[in-house]
Image (cartoon, rainbow, N blue to C red):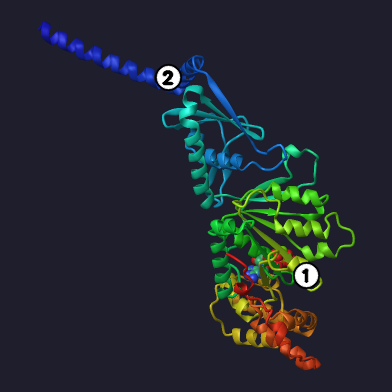
């Protein structure tokens, strides 16, 4: 009897202890007591270690962007420990359902490397590395190399691109001249209506450039490639820049020349840009045609040469857009300053079919022959104008096509004549490859009409040829 009683007592007390421990643990977790105890223990432990601090400022003393700062930031934002820190910033990512984590000001995050605990503090414009003196000699160098490698890998498949815009000089060199927002432009080479052959040439040109670091280095040249996109308004130049950025996974630095105070200011903007970026100046011809400008022609030329970028190891693609290049100083356009010339003509039938497919889901339609005929007669609108009509009538493809036909016919009667005249200037000299096949017919009609047909075979040889214009890469 006593044995049974003792056994019962033992089981009962065991169960009671178990329930007590379980409840104690729940209370500890719920109230965060474990976390507080751990934290206190660490701060006591810290008192017995000597730490060393290393600062990684965003800009150097000549206000040039410190690439290491960018690399460390990319690396830290990728750490899982950012999720465990006390607070952090949440942003929507490239896709709308994606959420990304970013370090906040004064946030401290912890990292482990080769058994050493390393802390990073995100102070204003400076990242501070805190490491035990005892670990420093063994760990610091390989750790920085590790950051370099990881950030390069992450940069390759950048999940978030940035659009930088220059702000008016606030005479606070420390802050830099660029302000950034996430770059989420959805344009890709697939969504652009242009000849697929040309798209492929551009893609392979960009691809081979991105891989040509050693080549440029051996030649002692700045690792950059310059594109000129020229053509009438609404023909896809800006969309093409966005497609390039998405294809390369490069950040975009969009320079507004009206906010640049002088030549040296323009140099600073270039110095403060990061590697793997697209440097964009839109409407350069319009700026150059203005009477008094803050930036001189020679300032723009030296900017285009990129001689001031800090090292050959930093890759940049420069993109300039113009409505036309006829009145532009030839020095701007010379090979080396502009490596690739791309003409963006008004919409033709081929481009129209691509737009109809993307915007209306139409591969073919009984009205297509009529549209083709109108294009052959020379009427023309920009891709932007046609795509707007398609969007407005997207619920009824037939109505959309009729509206486009109507607009093209109206255009042919009135505004189109003006366009043809304007196109002839571009295309007699430069029957460019972008979408000009149909346009050439239109120009022929125009020339026949006015007896202007002059064969300019010598100038035709200057026509756009991506490969022909390549100087390197
Ligand atoms: N080739 C094209 N393919 C697909 N969409 C186009 C094309 N061209 C223009 N669009 C559409 O028209 C709109 C305007 O195009 P975009 O801003 O790229 O033209 P742009 O040449 O830069 O004009 P601007 O010279 O006035 O700046 C875009 O939203 C785009 O959707
Ligand atoms: Mg544009």
Would you identify the image quadrant in which residue 354 lies? bottom right
Point out residue 286 in the picture as x, y percentages from the top left corner. Answer: 81, 65
Q: Residue at x 42, y 32 (%)?
A: 114
- Provide the secondary structure element on which disc 1 rests: helix
Question: Callout 2: 10 Å neighbours few (<14), some, many (20+)?
Answer: some
Note whether ligand 1 is within 8 Å of mark 2: no
- Seen in the picture, residue 31 relative to 371 is either above or below; the reply is above
Relative horizontal placement of residue 16, taking residue 111 as reference (left or right): left
- Give the residue number, with chain letter if any, for mark 1: 330
- Most distant residue in the left direction: 1
Point out residue 289 in the picture as x, y percentages from the top left corner. Answer: 85, 65
Mark seen at residue 28: 2
Question: Callout 1: 10 Å neighbours few (<14), some, many (20+)?
Answer: few
Would you identify the image quadrant in which residue 171 lies? top right
- Seen in the picture, residue 321 relative to 351 is either above or below; the reply is above
Q: From where the camera sits, is residue 270 visible?
A: yes
- Seen in the picture, residue 184 relative to 454 is either above or below; the reply is above
Q: From where the camera sits, is residue 391 visible?
A: no
């Amino acid at each position: 009897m006593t044995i049974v009683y003792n056994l019962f007592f033992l089981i009962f007390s065991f169960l009671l202890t178990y329930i007590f421990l379980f409840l104690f643990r729940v209370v500890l977790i719920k109230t965060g007591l474990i976390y507080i105890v751990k934290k206190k223990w660490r701060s006591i432990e810290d008192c017995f270690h000597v730490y060393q601090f290393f600062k990684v400022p965003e800009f150097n003393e000549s206000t040039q962007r410190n690439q290491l700062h960018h690399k460390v930031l990319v690396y830290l934002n990728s750490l899982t420990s950012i999720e465990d820190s006390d607070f952090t910033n949440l942003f929507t990512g490239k896709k709308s359902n994606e959420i990304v984590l970013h370090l906040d000001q004064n946030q401290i995050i912890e990292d482990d490397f080769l058994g050493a605990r390393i802390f990073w503090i995100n102070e204003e414009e400076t990242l501070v590395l805190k490491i035990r003196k005892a670990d420093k000699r063994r760990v610091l160098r390989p750790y920085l190399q590790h950051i370099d490698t990881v950030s390069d890998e992450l940069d390759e498949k950048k999940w978030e691109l940035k659009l930088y815009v220059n702000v008016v000089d606030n005479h606070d060199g420390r802050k830099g001249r660029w302000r950034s927002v996430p770059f989420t432009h959805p344009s890709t080479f697939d969504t652009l209506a242009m000849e697929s052959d040309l798209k492929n040439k551009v893609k392979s040109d960009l691809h081979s450039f991105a891989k040509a670091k050693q080549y440029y280095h051996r030649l002692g040249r700045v690792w950059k490639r310059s594109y000129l996109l020229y053509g009438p308004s609404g023909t896809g130049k800006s969309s093409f820049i966005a497609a390039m950025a998405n294809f390369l996974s490069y950040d975009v630095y969009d320079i507004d020349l009206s906010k640049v105070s002088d030549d040296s200011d323009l140099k600073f903007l270039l110095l403060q840009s990061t590697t793997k970026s697209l440097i964009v100046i839109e409407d350069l011809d319009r700026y150059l045609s203005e009477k008094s400008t803050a930036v001189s022609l020679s300032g723009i030329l030296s900017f285009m040469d990129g001689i001031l970028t800090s090292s050959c190891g930093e890759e940049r693609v420069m993109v300039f857009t113009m409505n036309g290049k006829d009145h532009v100083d030839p020095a701007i356009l010379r090979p080396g300053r502009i490596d690739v010339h791309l003409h963006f003509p008004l919409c033709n039938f081929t481009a129209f079919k691509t737009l109809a497919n993307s915007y209306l889901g139409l591969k073919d339609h009984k009205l297509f022959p009529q549209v083709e005929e109108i294009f052959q007669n020379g009427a023309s609108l920009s891709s932007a104008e046609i795509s707007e009509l398609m969007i407005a009538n997207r619920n009824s493809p037939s109505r959309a096509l009729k509206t486009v036909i109507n607009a093209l016919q109206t255009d042919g009667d009135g505004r189109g004549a003006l366009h043809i005249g304007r196109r002839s200037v571009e295309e007699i000299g430069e029957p460019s490859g972008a979408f000009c096949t149909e346009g050439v017919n239109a120009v022929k009609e125009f020339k026949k009409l006015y007896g202007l047909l002059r064969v300019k075979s010598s100038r035709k040889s200057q026509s756009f040829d991506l490969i022909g214009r390549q100087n390197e890469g």
